[in-house]
Image: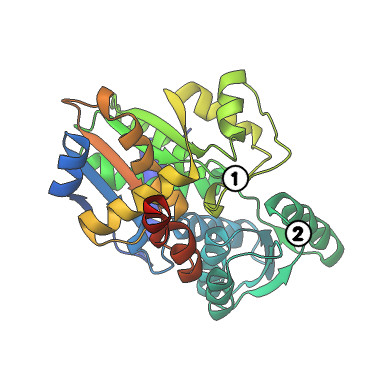
Amino acid sequence: MFSLSELREAHDVVQKALRPTPAFAWPLLAARLGTEVVVKHENHQPTGAFKVRGGLTYCDALVRREPAARGIISATRGNHGQSLAFAGRRFGLAVTIVVPHGNSSEKNAAMRALGADLIEHGTDFQAAREEAMRLAEAGGLHMVPSFHRDLVCGVASYALELLAERPDLDVLYVPIGQGSGICGCIAARDALGLKTEIVGVQAAGAPAYALSFGAGRAVATTSADTFADGMATRAPDAEAVAVIAQGASRVVLVSDDEIAEAIRAYWTDTHNLAEGAGGAPLAAAMKERARLAGRKVGLVLSGGNIDFGLFQRRVAAAPKAAAA
């Protein structure tokens, strides 16, 4: 997808606004999985998630390509919107974000605090995306997609950091929302000439990319039923599917209960809070523990933006419910 020089140039853009995030090896996680584990902490970003990297490179390319651009619009469940709001403020762009009704109240508040004009529409991400496209055409705004080459190039900077530091990783588990994260990992691995196995992770209730991976083409679903909003997509991007099909080894499905268990494990073993998508890679590794013996494992903790109420209902309360 990208040459190493392209990825390094994108990383330079990102580094003007952000510091590299840490990659820590946690002993308790190693004991839990029975092998060496390294976590890439994108939850330590100022927006709480990895997507801010892509927002910066996308807006940088946009203002250079279209210097007269004044406003952008996009749809999100939260992290993509925060990314664009953060980057838009830095590049002098007005930002409008469309979210579905019932979206994370804390992510909505964060986007507004970063200066975004927030619009609620529809019941899921796909409905919000269709409305954003309509508003872009009606209002002459630049529509930012959820998957685009400029986004992926920026997002790949976290994988470039991780794999340059730990080229010995045998396998890397990555959550899939609209695909920029896993495609960025594939791009960085290939540009660095490494053999690290890339494994995608999706929620069992939102399996569009897993189905697409199996079919070798984009397969949409009629629903995306998961509390992990960062993975709650039902219309895969065909370009992302093509990259994943060629560069990933498999896509693992994990249940919401398994994701909640992984979020608890992150808290007890590292005292880091993960959102649903951020916990999913650990959930997949826990599910595949038997095949990981003797292998060096990387986990992308993609974000920590989980609402407190949701955490109470789906994560903190779960052990008590199980005991009852």
Q: Regarding mark 2 in the picture, which secondary structure is present there?
A: helix
Residue 225 rendering spot, x and y as whole percentages: 62, 46
Residue 175: x and y in percent read: 45, 42
**Front in this rendered view, residue 121 or 162:** 121
Which of the two discs, 2 and 1, labels the residue nearer the N terminus? 2
User: Would you place residue 280 above or below residue 87 in this image?
Assistant: above
Q: Position of residue 71 (x, y in %)?
A: 69, 69
What residue sits right under mark 1 in the picture?
147
Disc number for residue 90: none
Occupied quadrant, residue 131: bottom right
Q: Position of 277 compared to 234: left or right?
A: left
Q: In this view, does 162 lie above or below 66?
A: above
Give the crowd class for mark 2: few <14, some 14-19, many >=20 residues within 10 Å. Answer: many
In the rendered structure, the answer to whether residue 56 lies left or right of residue 9 reads right
- Please identify the quadrant where the C terminus is shown: bottom left
Q: Is residue 14 in view? A: yes
Snapshot quadrant of residue 212: top right
- Residue type beneath disc 1: Phe
Q: Which of 291 and 1 lies nearest the eye of the viewer?
A: 291
Which residue is at a point 53% across and 40% down the rendered structure image?
179
- Determine the residue positioned at 38% across, 58% down: 320
Q: Is residue 128 left or right of residue 150?
A: right
User: Which residue occupies 24% across, 57% down?
Assistant: 268
Name the residue type under label 2.
Answer: Ala
Alpha carbon separation for disc pair 2 and 1 = 15 Å
Residue furthest right as drawn: 138
Q: Residue furthest top?
A: 215
The image shows residue 253 at horizontal and vertical percentages of 48, 33
Question: How many neighbours does mark 1 have within 10 angstroms: few (below 14), some (14-19), or many (20 or more)?
Answer: many
Q: In which quarter of the image is residue 29?
A: top left
Residue under pointer 2 = 132
